Amino acid sequence: AHGGDPQERLHQDRVLTPWRLGLWRLCLSYQLSAISYQLSAISYQLSAISYQLSFISLWVRSQAGSLCHKADH
């Protein structure tokens, strides 16, 4: 029988649908966890960058201070 009995196909759909939903939920949760992981990585990078910037500004200030002292003498 080509295509099968409508009753048969309905039964197959009933069996397959929970599987599809389960897979879909699994994919969705995986994507969400991946996104949250990426966001945490980005926030980590941003904090590292801000740390570097504060370090650089401190260094620049110390350099400028030493230059000013040299200019005074």
Image (tube, rainbow, N blue to C red):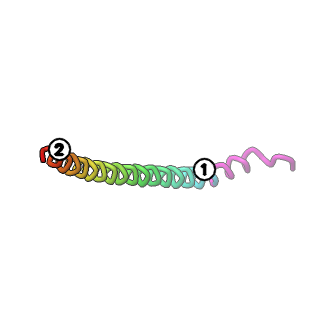
Q: Which residues are magenta?
A: 1-15
Residue 38 place in picture, x, y as percent: 44, 52
Identify the mark at residue 65; answer none if there is no mark.
none
Residue 20 place in picture, x, y as percent: 60, 51
Q: Residue furthest front?
A: 73
For badge 2, the amino acid type reads Ala
Residue 6 place in picture, x, y as percent: 75, 44
**Residue at 60% over, 50% down:** 17
The image shows a total of numbered marks equal to 2
Viewer-side label of 2, 1: 2
Identify the mark at residue 17; answer none if there is no mark.
1
Number of other residues with Cα within 10 Å of mark 1, as a class: few under 14, some 14 to 19, many 20 or more: few
Could you say whether the residue bearing mark 2 is in a helix, strand or loop? helix
Q: Nearer the viewer, residue 50 or 4?
A: 50
Q: Nearer the viewer, residue 28 or 72?
A: 72
Q: Is residue 70 magenta?
A: no
Identify the mark at residue 71; answer none if there is no mark.
2
Secondary structure mostly taken by the magenta-highlighted segment of the chain: helix
Determine whether, in the image, residue 5 is placed left or right of residue 41: right
Q: Is residue 4 magenta?
A: yes
Number of other residues with Cα within 10 Å of mark 2, as a class: few under 14, some 14 to 19, many 20 or more: few
Q: Nearer the viewer, residue 13 or 52?
A: 52
**Residue at 12% over, 44% down:** 72
Residue 55 place in picture, x, y as percent: 26, 53
Could you say whether the residue bearing mark 1 is in a helix, strand or loop? helix
Q: Nearer the viewer, residue 20 or 60?
A: 60
For badge 1, the amino acid type reads Thr
